[in-house]
Amino acid sequence: MSSRPTLPSPRRWIAVVLLVLAAGAVSYVVSQPGSGNEYRILFDDAGQLVVGDLVRIGGAPAGTVEEVELAEGDRAAVRIRLDPDRPPLRAGTTAAIRAQGLTGIASRYVDLSPGPGTGPELDEGATIGTEDTQSIVEVDELFNTLDDDTRAGLRRLIHGSGDWYRGKTDEANEAAKYFSPAVAQLAAVAEEITRDSATFEDFIVEVGDAMSALADRRAELTSAVSGARATASALAADTSSLRQALGDLPPALREGADAMASLRAAIGDLERLVDATDEPSRELAGFVRDDLRPVLERSGPVFRRLRTMLAQPGEANDALDALRDLPRLASLVDESFPRAMKALDEGTPIFRFVRPYVPDLVGWARGFGAALATYDANGHYARTVPVFDAFRFTDDAQGGRLDPKPFAARGRSEAVTTGNLRRCPGTAGPLPDDGSAPYVDTGDEANPDCDPAQVVGRSR
């Protein structure tokens, strides 16, 4: 007699099912590529951002760059992953690409500014558009906007200003004291003009009409001026004749008096002439009354204000006082401007030496500020850990990378040297293959305090 197989009890079945479900959950978690939220950020320019660069929030590391690719519209699409302990981003989040320093070619990171806590959370894989992002601006782009003529003109302006101020610094400072009163007086004049703008406008219109009338007679005016110039030249060239003419003037006046006495008989004819011109005179009176008088009446307040501008009671408050001060101002400027020019000429070598190091100074200031971004209840603080010769530079298709060295091999590289006190700009890190560093000026801009042989990493 065969025995029937014994079936497992219900408790064993439940235990087996729970065990299978637990194993599946563990397998699912292990098979995931990583934890943390992922987002896609669009930039107009990736700015040498590479995979593995940091993502920071408030200066503290918050994630890494997972992928950099070309998106539609020739824009850069950067996929980032936040650390597991970071909460999801919210609407209104902005991003910017910044530089950590000038020690490497691709020393960039993504700086996130989270949106307000009241905004909705962004979905996993959400895209932050270019309207909320800012690409990095290289210092070279600013200098490249200036062409050769602009640089030459700026150089001449600086030299000319130096010649102007050379030896006259005190006089220039004294002259500057009168600048504010002059501006105040100009403001008062402008206020007076704008206060009665209608009258001033009428005055300008009348002057314009008068100038138009003169322009219509420019040929006659030119001829009259030319004739007057020729007469004055002739008189100046023949002073003896002028002296003779002045000597003959008294007899001529006496004879003129006799001639006027002889004209008394013509007075009757003159009266008839006046009577004949009576009708034209009435028309002239209407012109004076209707046209000329309104112009003169409207011009009266303007000329009174002009008189106030030229001369009014008090000191240093009108144009006449300004004219009195001009000789002293000219003497002060004559001494101060050469001094300023000398100061600018003597400062040119200093600016010439500092100019190539501007990117390094800007990078240091920016990196120094980022290092102190973290803070606690006591305020901002910085944590620094100096590490020397801890990485090895390796070339690859993306421009190179830094690989950590074993602890036993650190500090044993020949690249770690001392006495590098004359480094050129751009030699704080490995040299690029395109020859852009070290940066050494030539000609008039040459820097004698720069030694291109003092470099870090491989040589060109």
Image (spheres, helix red, strand yellow):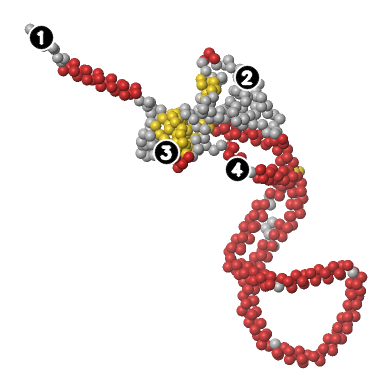
At 73% from the left and 40% from the top, the residue drawn is: 345
Task: Mark 3 or mark 4: name the one nearer the start of the chain.
Answer: 3
Q: Evaluate if marks 4 and 1 touch, with contact meaning CB atoms under 8 Å apart.
A: no
Give amino acid for label 2: Thr
The residue to which callout 4 is attached is 145
Quadrant into which the N terminus falls: top left
Rendered location of residue 266, percent (x, y): 80, 90
- Tell me which corner region of the image, top left, top right, bottom left or bottom right, holds residue 314: bottom right
Q: Real-space Cα distance between discs 1 and 2? A: 87 Å
Q: Evaluate if marks 3 and 1 touch, with contact meaning CB atoms under 8 Å apart.
A: no
The residue to which callout 1 is attached is 3
Give amino acid for label 4: Thr
Q: Is residue 341 left or right of residue 393?
A: right
Mark 3 secondary-structure assignment: strand
Is residue 169 visible in the rendered structure shown here? Answer: no
Among all residues in the image, which is located at the extreme left? 1
- Tell me which corner region of the image, top left, top right, bottom left or bottom right, holds residue 354: top right
Q: Real-space Cα distance between discs 3 and 1? A: 71 Å
The residue to which callout 3 is attached is 128
Task: Mark 1 or mark 2: name the one nearer the start of the chain.
Answer: 1
The residue to which callout 2 is attached is 417
Mark 1 secondary-structure assignment: loop
Rendered location of residue 346, percent (x, y): 73, 38
Q: Real-space Cα distance between discs 4 and 1? A: 97 Å
Task: Mark 4 or mark 2: name the one nearer the start of the chain.
Answer: 4
